[in-house]
Image (cartoon, helix red, strand yellow):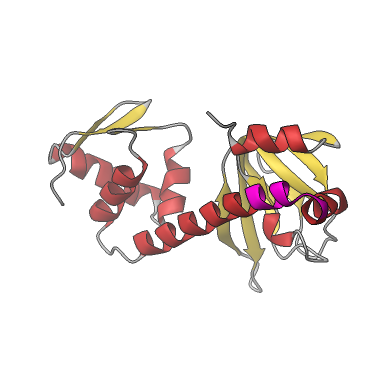
Amino acid sequence: MPPSFPQWITEQLKAEENKSLARTGVLFRAGEPVSKLYLLQSGEIRLARPLSHGDSLTIHRFLPGSVVAEASLFASHYHCDAVADRDSNLLCYNRKRVQNQLRSQPGFSERLCAYLSGEIQALRTKLELAHIKSADERLLTWIRLHASPSAVAIDRPLKSIASELGLAHETLYRSLRNLEDRQLIRRDRQQIVLTQCDSV
């Protein structure tokens, strides 16, 4: 079995630093010069774009195994804030060395491109889910997409899953209860299990 992408990239690149962030800690701010690429080992990092009235718009959430700031690999400055929503640990890589690796080693470039292609596919799936108006159906579709083979491990707060689905966390809790009442799922603190394949 080939190594996972996080394992593979740590074998290909030497990290300059192992960085720890407490919850609400800032990894970088919009406008700061780009100097590093990050691999999230544990925790959760949220990308947010500051808005003119003082609030921020969540653009993306990175989970363990994700490359953080990959969209800024060839940019001069970061375009978003990156904030830890949970205590997080990251490996930090020099951006110029990553760029040199891409130019000199086709195998590295191909593997990274394959990973980024997977990220694009995941984003498209997220956009498709956002077009499902029914919260119950959106959640059920998400469970079916992530079930392996019929269960989804709950390895992060439900609020994080709600944010990924574009739902208020109260709406997510209500939809979970609705799906349980309809006997489409059962759940405990560790997992959500599909019990039927009927549509909502």
In the image, is 123 to the left or to the right of 98? Answer: left
Q: Residue at x 70, y 47 (%)?
A: 107
Q: Is residue 97 visible?
A: yes
Number of marks present in the image shown:
0
Q: Residue at x 71, y 47 (%)?
A: 108
Q: Residue at x 17, y 39 (%)?
A: 184
- Furthest residue in direction bottom, as rendered: 52
Q: Estimate the x, y position of residue 78 in percent, counting from the top left.
A: 76, 62
From the viewer's side, name the closer residue of 114 and 143.
Answer: 114
In the image, is 81 to the left or to the right of 18? Answer: left
Residue 108 vertical position relative to residue 52 in the rendered view, above or below: above
From the viewer's side, name the closer residue of 28 and 114.
Answer: 114
Q: Estimate the x, y position of residue 13 in percent, counting from the top left.
A: 79, 38
Residue 121 vertical position relative to residue 111 in the rendered view, above or below: below
Q: Is residue 87 visible?
A: no
From the viewer's side, name the closer residue of 86 and 148.
Answer: 148
In the image, is 1 to the left or to the right of 109? Answer: left
User: Does 105 lie within the magenta span?
Assistant: yes
Q: Residue at x 76, y 49 (%)?
A: 37
Q: Quadrant of residue 125?
A: bottom left
Q: Which residues are magenta?
A: 104-112
Residue 164 vertical position relative to residue 52 in the rendered view, above or below: above
Q: Estimate the x, y position of residue 18 in percent, counting from the top left.
A: 79, 32
User: Does 53 lie within the magenta span?
Assistant: no
Examine the residues drawn in magenta and state their main secondary structure: helix
Q: Estimate the x, y position of residue 181 in percent, counting from the top left.
A: 14, 38
